[in-house]
Image (tube, rainbow, N blue to C red):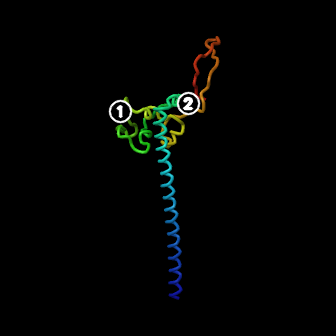
Amino acid sequence: MKTAAKKRARATTAASGSKRRALEDRLAAAKRLRAVEDAKFRARQAQGKFRRFVSANFRKQEVIEALALRRGECNRCGACCEILFKCPFLKKQDDGITTTCGIYEDRPNQCRLFPIEKRDLEEVRGQCSFYFIEKPIRLEKAEVRGQRSEVSNTVFTDL
């Protein structure tokens, strides 16, 4: 009887050991997957930094057109200043939430104009308060106090 009990105990121990190994294998696979996803995200951030640098400095007309679709205001979260690495000029306020730029008046164009396109918002994982509309609306005619008048400039409005 003792040998049968010992065999059952060994079988139970072996089964729990294989379950533990299976769990450890699943956890290791999940950790590898997170590492791969993080590396892909960092690669997109690096590509975005380079794209914004080129756009802000060499494709100014395209930037102007893209910024016409941007709406909202900066919430001073500092997320754009921590893409890939923390900017050395980023200063946190005493409240721990808002941030300021140590070189605000002289900051580079790609910082000044962030976000340039909707896809830039993906790099800060939704912390930015800016948003983009699909396309601007051109108003051809407007009524002013009962009179019709032509609108000479394009008026951009949210829908």
Quarter in which the C terminus is drawn: top right
Identify residue for label 1.
Answer: 103
Q: Taking 125 as reference, is 158 above or below it?
A: above
Amino acid type at circle 1 is Ile
Picture quadrant of residue 108: top left
At label 1, counting other C-alpha atoms closer than 10 Å, the crowd grade (few under 14, some 14-19, many 20 or more) is few
Q: Position of residue 6 (x, y in %)?
A: 50, 84
Residue 90 position, x and y percent, is 37, 38
Instruction: Tally the numbered discs.
Output: 2
Residue 7 vs 47, above or below: the answer is below
| Residue position for label 2 | 69
- Tell me the kind of residue under disc 2: Leu
Q: Residue at x 48, y 51 (%)?
A: 39
For this view, does 81 lie left or right of residue 121? left
- Residue at image position (51%, 87%) is 3
Residue 19 location in percent, x, y? 53, 70
Q: Are marks 2 and 1 in contact (CB under 8 Å)?
A: no
Q: Position of residue 145 (x, y in %)?
A: 61, 12
27 w.r.t. 141: above or below:
below
